[in-house]
Image (cartoon, grey):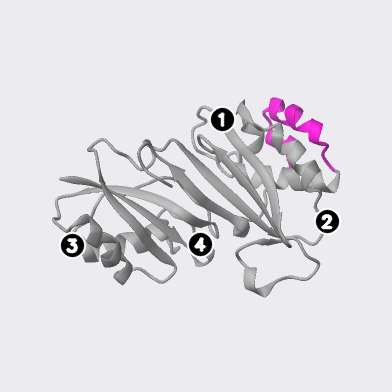
């Protein structure tokens, strides 16, 4: 019995997120169908995270256990033969028995892309938010700096029916950069709450609009109330970019 770790990427534009759902096409559903074709059995697949409908992944990790003897280096090409062109497996490794794609994760990095130009770009439609107003990145980075460190991020989480857990997370990096008209927000943390990145982006866009001052961020965080932060940014600009594990290069 081996524990297999896989690194895959996917275009989330046509998927209703990672996790299997009734009456919706998801990445996990397509992945499980391909895995069944390769090893001929059902496996308990562990994903590193949930992703919402329309969200993309440059690196998404899964783990599963199997007795199938297929060489680990043959798993990516075998899976890619059966997967749709919107999903690709990049790497496979055999891990220790106790490895778990979610619980062994040491942190994640997301990026959010914004096409910042008065005219929409058809070639980034569905892959970046079209935002035509000017963006003051220095002001937005001033606000983002207040998010660094360990805080209770209840104000930046969408309430749902799941049991409320520890809402503290440690943000290690948060920065806005630009390359021409493409603006990118990069954020790394030990973990993220439901819709946390999208709410942070929406809040920092409010900072750019002058609706929130950079120095208001600590007060919003301390309030522990979703009503004090900005809107939830649309999903199409969001990418799970890197997932961190001990002993695995990203």
Q: Is residue 14 magenta?
A: no
Horizontal and vertical percent position of residue 111: 59, 50
Q: Which one is nearer the viewer's eye here, 127 or 20? A: 127
Question: Distance of mark 3 from mark 4, alpha carbons?
Answer: 26 Å
What kind of element bears circle 1?
strand
Q: Given this view, does label 4 or label 1 mark the residue nearer the observer?
A: 1
Circle 3 crowding by C-alpha within 10 Å: few under 14, some 14–19, many from 20: few
Which comes before the other along the chain, label 3 or label 1?
3
Which comes before the other along the chain, label 2 or label 1?
2
Which comes before the other along the chain, label 4 or label 1?
4
Q: Mark 4 sits on what residue?
A: 12
Q: Quadrant of the N terminus?
A: top left
Q: Mark 3 sits on what residue?
A: 40
Circle 4 crowding by C-alpha within 10 Å: few under 14, some 14–19, many from 20: many
Kindly check if marks 4 and 1 are in contact, taking CB atoms under 8 A apart as contact: no
Kindly check if marks 3 and 1 are in contact, taking CB atoms under 8 A apart as contact: no
Question: Distance of mark 3 from mark 2, alpha carbons?
Answer: 53 Å
Q: What stretch of residues is rendered in magenta?
A: 211-230
């Amino acid at each position: 019995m081996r524990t297999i770790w896989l690194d895959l990427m996917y275009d989330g534009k046509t998927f209703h997120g990672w996790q299997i759902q009734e009456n919706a096409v998801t990445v996990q559903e397509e992945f499980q169908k391909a895995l069944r074709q390769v090893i001929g059995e059902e496996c308990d697949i562990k994903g590193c995270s949930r992703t919402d409908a329309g969200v993309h992944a440059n690196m998404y990790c899964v783990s599963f256990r199997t007795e199938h003897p297929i060489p680990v280096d043959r798993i990516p090409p075998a899976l890619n033969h059966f997967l749709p062109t919107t999903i690709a497996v990049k790497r496979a490794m055999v891990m220790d028995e106790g490895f778990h794609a979610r619980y062994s994760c040491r942190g994640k990095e997301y990026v959010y892309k914004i096409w910042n130009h008065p005219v929409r770009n058809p070639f980034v439609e569905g892959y970046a938010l079209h935002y035509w107003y000017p963006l003051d990145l220095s002001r937005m980075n001033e606000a983002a700096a207040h998010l660094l460190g360990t805080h209770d991020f209840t104000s930046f989480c969408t309430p749902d029916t799941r049991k409320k857990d520890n809402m503290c997370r440690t943000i290690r990096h948060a920065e806005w950069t630009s390359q021409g008209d493409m603006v990118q927000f990069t954020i790394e943390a030990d973990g993220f709450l439901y819709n946390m990145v999208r709410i942070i982006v929406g809040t920092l866009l409010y900072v750019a609009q002058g609706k929130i001052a950079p120095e208001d961020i600590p007060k919003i965080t301390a309030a522990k109330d979703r009503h004090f932060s900005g809107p939830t940014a649309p999903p199409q600009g969001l990418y799970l970019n890197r997932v961190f594990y001990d002993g695995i290069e990203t």
